[in-house]
Image (spheres, rainbow, N blue to C red):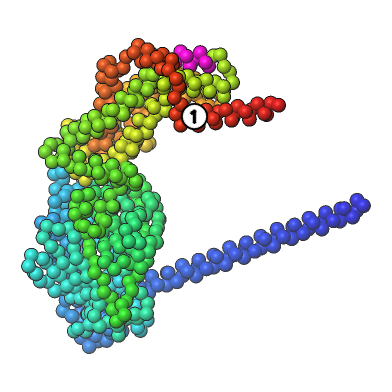
Amino acid sequence: MEEKKFDKNSIIGFGLIFLIVMWMMFNSQQAEQKEQAEKAKQAQVDKQKKAKEVATKEVAAVVVDTVVNDTVKKQKLQGALGSFAYSASLPTAKEGYTVLENDLVKLTISNKGGYVSEAILKKYEKFSKGSGQLVELIKNNNANFNLALQTKDNRVLNTNDLFFEPTFKQVGENKVLSMKLKTGATTFLEYNYTLKPNDYMVDFDLRSQGLSTALNTSKETNLEWDLKTYRNEKSINYENQNAEVYFEYEEGKIDYVSQGSDQEETPENTSFIAYKQHFFSTILLTNTPFKTAKIHSSSLVNDEKVDTVFTKEFKSIVPLAYNSKGELDYKMNWYFGPTDYKTLKSYEGKNLDKVIPLGWGIFGWINRLIFIPLFGFLGGFMSYGLAIIIFTILIKIAMSPITFKSFLSQAKMKVLRPEIAEISEKIKDPVKKQQETMKLYSKAGVNPMAGCIPALIQMPFLVASFRFFPSAFELRQKPFLWADDLSSFDQILKLPFNIPLYGDHVSLFPILAAIAIFFYMKMTSGDNQMAQPQQEGMPDMTKIMKMMIYLSPIMMLIFFNSYGSGLSLYNFMSNLITIGIMLVIKKYFIDSDKIHAQIQENKTKPVKEGKFQKKLREVMEQAEEQKAKGKK
């Protein structure tokens, strides 16, 4: 019997080993196939890239070659460009630029590629006010706009390598520039730019005429748009945190590409793609939604001491479809301007204000319906620093009834402490202890949740402020007291070394905010300590609150040191005003003797049990019954 048993076990063991070996071989084969597929894919990409580089060099060599005669040159162009050799043979097939500008923006469009090679905002300066350096969204080849045209003779020609013919005209007050990449006198690919006065938005029509004979219209043409975003603010890390790609898709939905390196999204039916650089944006909009899009974002700031020029690299690949006539026809727009809520909101029906991260749900509503109108009104006739202070006072006054209810609840709980402590000493069973405590609350007419609810009501306003102030364009380069820019940190001391997480400078408003939050938490925690004894199996809230008294100010110091000083000023004033309101309420509105007398009077009245208290009592009674059954 033992021998048979051994044989059976041996067979099972060998069977398991065989299955494991087969599984390992299968996985190995799958991995090898995957590796081969990836190598083949990469080889194809490298091949296309090399072909593109070779084609670019050939085109450039032919165009600039002044030694060969016209006949030889035309033959070479025909061999390299096919039908598009016509455009390269025109007198305008050389480096050249056309400038479109109004009072707000200056755009330079290059003959080579036909795209905007320079975009400068004339009303705004880099880094700090008075620097003398205007904000440059596009300059020195940090941007690329290209169509990868697939011809019928199996070529792939890139428009950024080819020369467009410029034609400028004035239509009323509008400046219109037509850039044509020609295959003949009446056949071409056209980029048409229209710049209106006093406007950041540029009409951009992309169309083709008569190219169905030259291009392979059975395949879509890829539009490739790249941008390396220049640093424009004092803190490159803070600016980098707020630089993102937003896009609208599926008729009104707004989303963004996550922060970090090599992040990508592939939305469908995309209406606009916005390259947002914290306070400035470059946006491509289309009336005919892009069927698909591949949008990529990557951070270029690994070390703020070294990486000081660019913040992010954004890339988009959008397939453009040909219409029924075999032509491209897209009505689009370019926006080169500030990420300012009022400015973006003024373009009705385009949803551009949604690229400003004001928060989702109730947080966004608070910002749009309360914070933005109120702050905008105050900023219209006073300095923005003073506007923050008045704004904070008004918000706190509006919230003061809620604050009063919270403190009144805390005062009632404080009066009940001796009786709660007595219950805790007499009753050791946690469930019975909780039941008796709830009975005491009910008899005294005290709701233990009353102190928490006001805090929960105020929480959305606090969260909304953390979205509002970093996005408030109005604060950019606006001074107040020692802060020269309320949208950036208020440095009072430059350190000769860098402290991890904290930075290499000392900001004063975060220090003041940390001091204010320390005293605020000291006062509120002092009133709440031991309001209810610790329950068995539950964390010691007294110890946690003591830790938070010191932890919260430290967090304020660390994380706000490089944040915009406007947010730190708001937090400082918010906590300072709250402390003042607390002191006034305690001195003039909270009378412990009267509260105690009222509680004692409530105990003599019939108890009216609320829905919450009734449900809580029923749950505790059920728990007690289950416990009693378990003992039996």
Q: Quadrant of residue 597?
A: top left
Q: Is residue 230 left or right of residue 28?
A: left
Would you name the residue on which mark 1 appears?
614
> Which residue is painted at 38% across and 70% down in the image?
49
* Residue 348 or residue 99, whichever sits in front: 348
Look at label 1 and name its amino acid.
Answer: Lys
At mark 1, the secondary structure is: helix
Q: The C terminus is located in which quarter?
A: top right
Which residue sits furthest bottom?
Answer: 71
Which residue sits furthest left?
Answer: 172
For the record, the magenta segment spans 414-424
Can residue 115 be seen at all in this image of the molecule? no
Q: Position of residue 30 (x, y in %)?
A: 60, 64
Where 230 sits versus 453, above or below? below
Q: Quadrant of residue 188?
A: bottom left
Q: Position of residue 586 (x, y in %)?
A: 30, 17
Where 582 sits versus 185, above or below? above
> Which residue is painted at 47% across and 14% down in the image?
419
What secondary structure characterizes most of the magenta part?
Answer: helix
* Residue 170 or residue 39, whichever sits in front: 170
Q: Position of residue 245 (x, y in %)?
A: 32, 55
Give neighbour class at mark 1: few <14, some 14-19, many 20+ (Cα, 10 Å).
few
> Which residue is painted at 13% across and 41% down in the image?
380
